[in-house]
Image (spheres, rainbow, N blue to C red):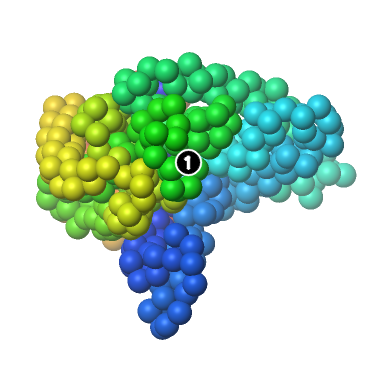
Amino acid sequence: MMKYLQKLGKSLMLPVACLPICGILMGIGYALCPSTMQGGEMSGFLNLLGFFLVKAGGALIDNMAILFVIGVGVGMADDHDGTAGLAALASWLMITNLLAVGTVTAMIPSIADDVNKSLAFSKIANPFIGILAGIIGASCYNKFKGTQLPDWLSFFSGKRCVAIISGVVSILASAVLLIVWPIVFGALIAVGQGIVGMGAVGAGIYAFLNRLLIPTGLHHALNNVFWFDTIGLGDLSHFWAGETSADVTWSLGMYMSGFFPCMMFGIPGAALAMVHTAKSNKKKVAIGLVASAAVCSFICGVTEPFEFGFMFLAPMLYLIYALLYGVFTIIVTLLGFRAGFSFSAGATDLFFSAFLPGAANTWMIIPLGIAAFVVFYVVFRFAIVKFDLKTPGREDDDVEEEKKAVLSNSNFTEVASIILEGLGGKGNVKSLDNCITRLRLEINDYTKVDEKKIKSAGIAGVIRPSKNAVQVIVGTKVQFVADEMKKML
C-alpha cells in the first residue's frame, strides 16, 4: 500500500510542478490588487495588472483537479503513454457530469430538497475525484492496452479500447458514488455539528480534519458547518458582516484564526526544512517546488501547491502537518487572537480583517508566527530525517552516484539487448518502467536473472528489491535504453 501511495505521489509531481507559477502570479497579483479578493472597484494600472495576474494564476489553481486527472493517468500508466491520460480525462468528464447537481436532481428529485446532498454533489469536481479518474484511466490502460478484439471490431483493439472501457468503469464508479458520496459528506457535517460545543478543543479538531480532508475535497462539508450558516453558526459570514462575539453564541473568528500562523509562517518553516533535508544535488529542485509555494501561502493562503507536493510521497508527514494545525488552532483560540478570511488565511486577508469589529489581538500574529515557523521547521526536519521520508528532493531515484553513472557502450540497442538477455528474455519480463537513472522491471522467474550478463552491458549495478522486481542502474541515459528495450518487448 505504501509503495502504491509513493507511486501515486510521484505521478502527482508533474501536475504539482505546474502550481508554483500560479502561486507566484497570485501572490503578486493579490498584493497589487487586494480588491480582487476583498471586493470594491479596481482603478489604475497596478490594480489591473494585479487582477490580470490573479486570473492567470487562478487558471491553474482553479482547475487543479484536471491537472491531477491527466498527471495521475499518465504517471500511473506502465509506460507513461498519453492514451492513459486521455482515458483518465474521459473518466473525469463522465463522473463529474453524471454526478453534477442538475443530473442527480433530475434522476432523483428528492435530492433537490436535501440541502446537504445538494451541497455534496455541487462539490463533486474536486481533487479526490480527479485522482480517482486518473487511477481509473491508468488502470484500464495497464490492463487492456493489448486487448485483441474480433476482426469486425478490430479498429477498437489495443489502446483504442482503453477510453471506452474507462467510460464503462466510470459509469459503475458514478453509481457507487451516487450512494456513497452524500453519505460520507453528510457524516462529516454531522461530525462538525458534534464538535461545535467543544470550545477551543473543537476548533482544533476542526482544523485538523480540515487539512486532513484536503486531498479528498470533503473538507468542504466541514467548512460549510463552521464558516457558513448551515446549522446557525457561520463564523466567516458573521465575521465579515461586521459583528462581534457579543452578537453570536461563540467566540467569533475562532474557526478561522488558527489557520493564519500555520499558513503564513508554518508552511515557510516546513518548506525550509524540506530544502535543508533535500539531497545536495536536488536542493535546487526542492527550492523550485516549495519556495514559491511558501510565498504563495504567506501572501494569499493558497496551500495546495505545497501540500500536494508531499502528501502522497510522505503521508505520515501529512498527518503530522494536519495535527500541527489542530494544536495551533487550540492555542490561538485560547490566547484570544482573532482574525478572519474571505478567501484564505494569508497576509492579505489578515490585513483587511484586522479593521473589522470581530478582530482582536492581531498583533499576536508576530509571536504566534515565529512560534509556528520554528515548530513546523523542527518537527518537519526531525520527522523527515528520523523516518527517511521521501519529500521533494529525497526520492530514491535521485542518488548522486547513480546520476554520475556512465554507460561504457553508446549503442543503446546493444545495451538493451544484453540487459534483456540477462533478465531471462522478453518472456520473463512482466513490465518495464524507468525513473531518472534506473530501469524498473517486474519479472516472472527470478532464477532466470543473470546479473553478470546484465553488468556486462556496462551498466552501474543491479538491485533486487524482491523476487519479482529488478532495478538496473543505467545513469542519466536510461531513457534511451528503456525506449530500445520497449521496442524489443
Task: Judge by depth and name the residue closer to the eye, 285 or 220.
Answer: 220
Q: Decide: is 91 above or below 411.
A: above
**Within 10 Å of the Cα at label 1, are there few (<14), some (14-19), or many (20+) other Cα atoms?**
many
Can residue 312 be seen in this snapshot?
Answer: no
Can residue 8 be seen in this snapshot?
Answer: yes
Q: Decide: is 225 above or below 488.
A: above
Q: In this view, does 476 lie to the left or right of 142?
A: left
Task: Judge by depth and name the residue closer to the eye, 235 or 68.
Answer: 235
Task: Judge by depth and name the residue closer to the eye, 431 or 27.
Answer: 27
Q: Residue furthest front?
A: 246
Q: Please identify the quarter of the rendering in which residue 277 is found.
A: top left
How far from the left and from the top, in percent, is residue 300? Answer: 35, 55
Q: In this view, does 26 lie to the left or right of 106?
A: left
Q: Name the residue under label 1.
A: 238
Amino acid carrying mark 1 in the image: His
Quadrant (top left/top right/bottom left/bottom right) for the N terminus:
top left
Q: Residue at x 55, y 19 (%)?
A: 190
Q: Which residue is drawn at 30% across and 52% down?
A: 354
- For label 1, the SS is helix
